[in-house]
Image (cartoon, coloured by chain):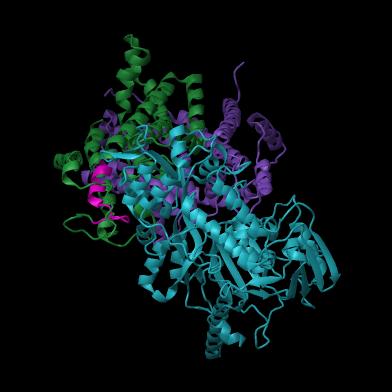
Chain colours: A purple, B cyan, C green
Amino acid sequence: MPNQHPMLTSLARHAVRIAITVVVGGLLGATLVREAPGFGIDEAELDSRLSSQSIQALRQAQPNQSLRAFYFQYLARLLCGDLGTSRSLQRPVAELLKERAPETAKSVALGLALGWTLGLSLAIAVVMSRSWGLDLTATLTTGILLCLPAAVLALIFLLARMPGRLVIALIVFPNIFRYSRNLLARSASLPYVLTARAKGVGGFQLMLWHILRPAAPQLLALAGVSVSIAFTAAIPVEALCDLPGLGQLAWKAALSRDLSLLVTLTMIVAVVTLAANSLSDLLGKALSTGTAEVPA
Amino acid sequence: MSRQIVFRSFLGLMLASTLAVAQNDAQLRFCLHSDPKSFNPLLAEEDSSETVRYLTGGVLMRLNRMTQDLEPELATSWKISDGGKTITFKLRNGLSFSDGTPFSADDVAFTIQQMMDPALHSPSGDAFRSGDGKTVTKVLAPDRVSVTFPAAIAGLDKLFDQVAIMSAKSPKKEMVVLGPYDVLEYKAGNYLLLEKNPNYWRHDAAGKQLPYIQTVRLDIQSNRDTEMLRLVRGEIDFINSLDAEFFDKLVQQNPALVHDSGVSLDSEQMWFNQVPSSPLPDYKKAWFRSTNFRRAVSEAINREDLARVAFRGHARPAVGPMSPANKFWFNAKLQPHPFDQKSALARLAQDGFRLQDGVLKDHDGHAVEFSIITNAGNKYRERMATMMQQDLSGIGIKLNVVTLDFPSLIERITRSFDYEACLLGLIGNDLDPNSSQMNVWISSGENHQWNPNQKTPATAWEAEIDKLMREQATSLDPKKRKAAFDRVQEIAWEQEPFIYLVNRNALSAVSPNARNVHPVVLRPQVYWNIDEISIGNEVARNR
Amino acid sequence: MRWVRNVGIAFLLTVALACLLADFVAPSYARQFRDEPDAAPSRQHLLGTDDLGRDRFARVLYGTRVSLLLAPAAALLSSVLAVLIGGAAGFAGGWVERIIMAATDLFLSLPWLFLLITVRALLPLNVSPIASVAITFALLGCLGWAAAARVICADARSLARSDFILLARASGSSGFRLLWRQAVPNLRPIVFAQFWISVPVFILAEANLGVLGLGVAEPLPSWGSLLRELQSYSAITGQPWQFVPLILFVVVVSCFHLVLLEQESTA
């Protein structure tokens, strides 16, 4: 019997796949945190004002249940909507996420929007103009941005009194430019594009239908990956610019080995990454033209 | 008519901007480097929580950070009796908490009982633990209370500087205060806003209620660069603890901004792992247990250079566990170990070490090479470790510098003991060695870093230190205590279980808008007299 | 614009030669001239000294040697892994692709910081600085393939349906040979992009891994450790020679890109 709702079936399959992968990701993340040195350590142990009994009590208060027990309890609580309590900040994880998620969402969304606008526009300009000078300038500019440490970029923005979250855009932009420039240049060198150009097809139509379209699946894959790049960039940017978002929270949680918080953040990042990449895969497959490629 | 409208609009604009300026003048702003972990004053252990406690907590007596004398606060007088086991307070009458709940001896008794609860593990409470047994509080009158500890506590009265009194009756529990400010608003990761406590008991000489400043805004700012830029831009009013580089940068821009209060109580030191069960090879354990080896390493390190180069001159060579800033307790007869590589080699020769082609080898032919761990991100320690690397290469020792994240480092020095040498620092919060040095020097102590939790002292000199520390902890005679601790410092100087390197200077920066600020060495350096500080026009408005 | 590429190649060769001859042209990179911290350029110190009085010119040369050798190697490793994993997934399609891509997405989400901390814990404390930095770059190479693998997979998927691949299959080519001989050359644009981006990213990442005890250990310099000097406002003295490591880094990476640009253009 033919599937009458192939799209829905595909979405459902993706959702199940995401759920399973996120659960596995949470377990792997918990394993990495639990087994790394420094777990269960409290800096207060070095406080010379504390008596031996107090320090022993501090040590005993640290989580020492097995990883399996912790994770099953965590999942059971998760099903009831309880994300646990952050050991380092002494607050419910759900409350922390609610406070900080909007900040990161803003930063990441802005970073992606600007990064893609700049990156893709510049790549299109380079490919359409076929100007070596523009290509060289764009290459050098993006090269300089890649060479500047995030801390230096953050400092420059600080000195210029510009919002620190724009640094994410400057981290995303060179990646987008480089990949999309190469993809679009390859599409533009295909014989039928040259034919279309010779036949007088206009620049906009040429770009949209003959250059962008064959590269669309790869660009969509890049879009999915860029979400992950932006999230990863958010961690040092928020830590350096003191933006109270999830990235700063992740950094603090990492330094204090806060297991509940780290597992939750890992799962969030996994959900966002998987969702973005699944969406780009679905769109990519839908747009795939199967254009013939000329061998190298 | 239109002229009237314009004129009134102009007046309105002027008034609004004046009010805005006045409101800004009524607020003091500075930064915390992390969110406070707790608002319970009994559980304050890190800098941010202690800041909140200092600004909001009312104490029975306060150590004046400038004169280092103990002054009455909520208690007008006190008397120590029963061989140092009992302290009786006479309290001020007619005081209230910030929510109006009356203050009485019951609140003092309640606070002490909470603090001494073994289940709470309060850092302030641990300083009072003198022996096994219960702490007994007796409310003798609404304004008189006595506290009896199981055993005598040396320096008992000064310990109450850290005890903020909590309300026994108020439903708001630890959120009601007796100090100059109380918490108005807290946005985690962002800021903490404190407002003037309307029931604060102190008044100035003219009878005006203190504090002068209406609100205090503490921004949560971990990035020190941002903090400094904000000070320069006038967005904050001071930096309580300034890095040496920032000091040098600011002094070029505006010398009036910065203050060097002189050497602080803080020290930087390294030590060797002497734990017998550590996973080190036996020959290295033998090196580290040798007094000659430790003294030689100490003499091979150029402390003057460390102070001059690593700290840009804002430090001085350290002698021992006490800094010269601690005028009473510092043993002035001791001097920093001199930089003398010849003497270092002579000491090593006594233990059979010899220099061969520029490489120091022990009597079994092992080349002397060891690693030193320190916490990553602390550029002073990273610099010091690199400088020590060059110094020790002068006597043929190869030093490997390893920077680790703090939890990994703590695990190595407290759990696995998988390290060879460690470079860390000690923050000096208290003058009296009884409160912060006890657990370091007692051989069974957790913070006896080179070989903690000993069942019996491993060496004769550690046994002697144990005896001396217990002696000074139970004596009430300041001279006897001083003599005992002087001897501890001498032993530490001779044996070098900690190789003390430098004492840093207390550096701060204060905006010219802040009035009556007198930075000192003791923490909190800048705002120790918070209720007397004013901002710009605030003084003119209030006087 | 072949001359631009030639200029790039010439500059890279000059830098490589200077680094190889560092032992002869520059004083020790470790020696601290403690009476001259943060000194201006002079005859003895061509680029001045750093905060510990170490000759900056020597440290730039030796640091370039370390980073120029190891970062491209790590970038190559991550590119090869990305091609093999992403290419195989895209080419195979079906459930193989789905599993590999799910694993790749998971790889992108995990907190690898803790793996790096664990690696540091497993290494002996007395590991030599060069071994420490080599291990760091190898780790970065092994961890840095996932993002590119995703894009390569999408590209490979498109290639798998193309006519020339169909022709190659019909001619009897299959499996790894088909992937390597027919598909991989067409993946060059993405691979170059991945390589191009990875070199500076890995150099900067190596510096940041100093927080975990990985990366280069004192006194050995690397570009990353030299750039750390610029990451604090207090450390920036405003003197132009402090920025030479950054400028050299940018110029060398740009020369790499100029050399690759022509390759990318003809790919």
Residue A83, visible in the rendered structure: no
- The percent coordinates of residue B157 (x first, y second) are 69, 68
Residue B94 falls in which quadrant of the image? bottom right
Residue C83 falls in which quadrant of the image? top left
- Marks counted in the figure total 0
Measured along the vertical axis of the image, is residue B387 above or below residue C102? below
Measured along the vertical axis of the image, is residue C249 above or below residue B435? above
Which quadrant, please, contains the N terminus of chain A? top right
Among all residues in the image, which is located at the extreme top?
C172
The residue drawn where x is 78% and y is 74% is: B90
Tell me which segment is drawn in magenta: C48-64
Residue nearer the viewer, A174 or A64: A64
- The percent coordinates of residue C3 (x first, y second) are 13, 41
Which quadrant, please, contains the C terminus of chain A? top left
The residue drawn where x is 58% and y is 44% is: B452
Residue nearer the viewer, B408 or B219: B408
Residue B9, visible in the rendered structure: yes
- The percent coordinates of residue C9 (x first, y second) are 17, 39
